[in-house]
Image (cartoon, helix red, strand yellow):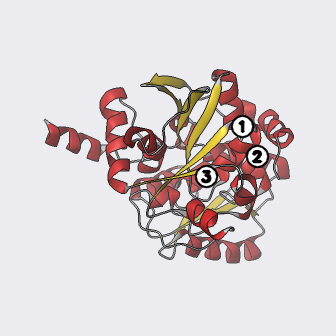
């Protein structure tokens, strides 16, 4: 189990390297705008914690990613002045792959799914000796992601529940460790439901992935560490792709927030009523990523007008 002590240690380690992202009142909830983090998502937190806690070898950093984790690792490598190699599947969004390259990392596109990229990455680690940073199923990654929970606690002292988009489970697991007395709500696309499948099976179980948010929430199995943190505690909520698309546009239309589909997934649960807040405490909805091509938002706006 990752606990608050580990998250506090991570916060002390990375605090000067990450942004304290803002919050915003939105309808009856508070949005935590983590899409404004360096590299466009919460993944920067876990990547910095992993690199700084272990030290980076001469061969640099290496990771497999659907997109956001790769961008974060590439950002960390550039900030630390080391090399980075990132393995991504063919399903990764072109905008995310371009961002990884723009940060100076070597990019390898391999396989159709994240698991394929991870297998290729593992093989390369054995050859290169680079430090591998896992996106969600490693203690230092989870503790680093949990620093988001410390900020929420500081910014919203009366927080009662936190809604988080969930793929492999690292962010939700870290926030659960940081906020042991707060309800954790894991929101997933119906077509990328690794946490819901784990709840049904009583352990992490493989799934098929088919969702508009698959490039960020497309893990084919929940991580073992996230399951340990979340299995007996978190609430599982599923939303349809149409609701995610509508929620993403709603954030843009009413607040000019340019979220990616995964970043809008938690808001979709609130907007559709798939999850409703209780009377106890303030609900915080995390907008976790903004690495997206915004041109389709403009197209939707034009069509609506």
Q: What element carries label 1?
A: helix
Q: Where is residue 231 in the image (x, y as percent from the top left)?
A: 70, 57
Q: Position of residue 37 (x, y in %)?
A: 57, 36
Q: Quick one: label 2, few (<14), some, or many (20+) residues within 10 Å?
A: many
| Frontmost residue, 99 versus 45 | 45
Judge whether 166 appears above or below 287 on screen: below
| Quadrant of residue 80 within the rendered picture | top right
The residue tagged 3 is 74
Q: Do the residues labelled 1 and 2 touch (CB within 8 Å)?
A: yes
Please tell me whether mark 2 or mark 3 is closer to you in this view: 2
Mark number for residue 19? none
Q: How far apart are marks 1 and 2 (CA)?
A: 7 Å
Q: Distance between the residues labelled 1 and 3?
A: 20 Å
| Residue positioned most to the front | 279
Mark number for residue 147? 1
Q: Is mark 3 on a helix, strand or loop?
A: helix
Q: How far apart are marks 2 and 3 (CA)?
A: 20 Å
Could you tell whether 56 is left or right of 284 in the image?
Answer: right
Q: Quick one: label 3, few (<14), some, or many (20+) residues within 10 Å?
A: many
| Frontmost residue, 208 versus 69 | 208
Q: Quick one: label 1, few (<14), some, or many (20+) residues within 10 Å?
A: many
Could you tell whether 54 is left or right of 159 in the image?
Answer: right
| Frontmost residue, 138 versus 30 | 30
The residue tagged 2 is 143
Residue under the point 69% across and 60% down: 134
Could you tell whether 29 is left or right of 174 in the image?
Answer: left
Q: Can residue 80 be seen in this view?
A: no
Image quarter of the C terminus: top left
Residue under the point 31% across and 44% down: 246
| Quadrant of residue 155 within the rendered picture | top right
């Amino acid at each position: 189990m990752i606990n608050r002590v580990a998250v506090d240690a991570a916060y002390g380690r990375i605090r000067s390297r990450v942004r304290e992202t803002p919050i915003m009142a939105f309808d009856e909830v508070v949005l935590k705008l983590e899409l404004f983090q360096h590299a466009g998502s919460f993944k920067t937190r876990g990547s910095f914690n992993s690199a700084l806690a272990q030290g980076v070898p001469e061969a640099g950093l290496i990771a497999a990613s659907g997109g956001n984790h790769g961008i974060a690792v590439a950002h960390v490598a550039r900030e630390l002045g080391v090399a980075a190699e990132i393995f991504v599947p063919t399903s990764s969004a072109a905008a995310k792959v371009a961002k990884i390259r723009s940060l100076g990392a070597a990019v390898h596109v391999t396989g159709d799914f994240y698991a394929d990229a991870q297998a290729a990455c593992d093989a390369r680690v054995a050859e290169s000796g680079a430090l591998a940073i896992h996106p969600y199923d490693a203690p230092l990654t989870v503790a680093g992601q949990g620093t988001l929970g410390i900020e929420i606690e500081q910014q919203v002292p009366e927080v009662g529940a936190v809604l988080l988009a969930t793929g492999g489970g690292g962010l939700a697991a870290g926030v659960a460790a940081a906020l042991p007395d707060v309800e954790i709500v894991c929101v997933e696309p119906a077509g990328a439901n690794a946490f819901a499948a784990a709840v049904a099976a009583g352990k992490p179980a493989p799934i098929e992935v088919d969702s508009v948010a698959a490039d960020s929430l497309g893990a084919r199995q929940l991580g073992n560490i996230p399951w340990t943190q979340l299995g007996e505690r978190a609430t599982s909520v599923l939303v349809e792709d149409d609701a995610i698309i509508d929620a993403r546009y709603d954030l843009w239309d009413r607040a000019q927030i340019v979220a990616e589909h995964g970043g809008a997934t938690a808001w979709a649960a609130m907007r559709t009523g798939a999850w409703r807040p209780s009377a106890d405490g303030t609900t915080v909805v995390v907008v976790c990523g903004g690495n997206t091509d915004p041109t389709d938002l403009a197209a939707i706006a034009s069509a609506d007008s």
